[in-house]
Amino acid sequence: MGLGEFVLARALHVLGVVLWIGGVAFVTLVLLPGLRQYGAAGERMALFERLEGGFARQARATTLLTGLSGLWLVHQLHAWSRFADGRYWWMHAMVAVWLLFTLMLFVLEPWFLHRWFNARAAHDPVGTFRLLEGLHCFLLTVSLVTVAGAAAGSHGWMF
Ligand code: HEM
């Protein structure tokens, strides 16, 4: 496998991660707190959906890009055996975060969560918004731990 291909896969992988997890950070740290502060309780959910809809589309694309380039990297590095070694926990974390977001973006959100959140927000807008913030906070935290672990681990750090 050529060096050019390896460099390309790594560059695409990191670009995917930056756009995707950067967007999650913006939604969690800027958009949601802003809506909580300035939006009326009954309107926050509808406004959030309209603003975040564009990001969800982008996140589906960058999740695909990150997953495909990641698989390409594992293949080129012959790194499958890492999944049997606990010191490579950050490899498991990458796959787990990827699966979690894939499930959320492609399955749970469009088929189920969207309707469930709207129905819940109709009778408890404040609690539902808090739940939405908690969920994003959780997703961002596990993503950032994974980014830090993968960046350190792929440059030789062992835990
Ligand atoms: C199916 C999902 C994924 C696979 C198979 C995968 C695989 C890989 C592989 C093989 C590497 C190179 C490791 C090395 O050089 O030793 C890598 C690097 C990296 N990955 Fe992933 N990855 C996936 C998802 C993710 C996700 C979801 C994130 C972020 C939350 C992520 C963040 C990173 C980072 C930050 C690096 C280090 C880049 C660098 O410092 O050069 N990956 N990934």
Image (spheres, helix red, strand yellow):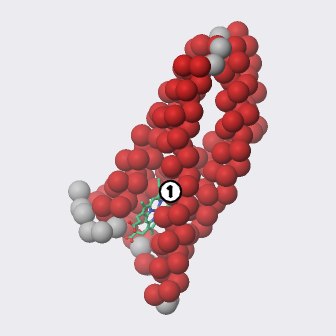
- Relative to 129, 112 lies left or right: right
- Relative to 156, 112 lies left or right: right
- Relative to 59, 26 lies left or right: left
Residue 61 rendering spot, x and y as whole percentages:
67, 57
Q: Let me know if residue 85 appears in the view.
A: no
Above or below for 109 versus 21: above
Residue found at x 49% / y 42%:
25
**Residue lying furthest top in this view?**
123
Mark 1 secondary-structure assignment: helix
Identify residue for label 1: 18
Residue found at x 53% / y 83%:
5
Residue found at x 46% / y 87%:
3
- Relative to 89, 27 lies left or right: right
State the quadrant of the C terminus.
Answer: bottom left
Above or below for 91 versus 119: below
Task: Kindly indicate the quadrant of the structure image that contains residue 150.
Answer: bottom left
Residue 35 rendering spot, x and y as whole percentages:
59, 24
Residue found at x 56% / y 46%:
23
Name the amino acid type tagged 1: Val
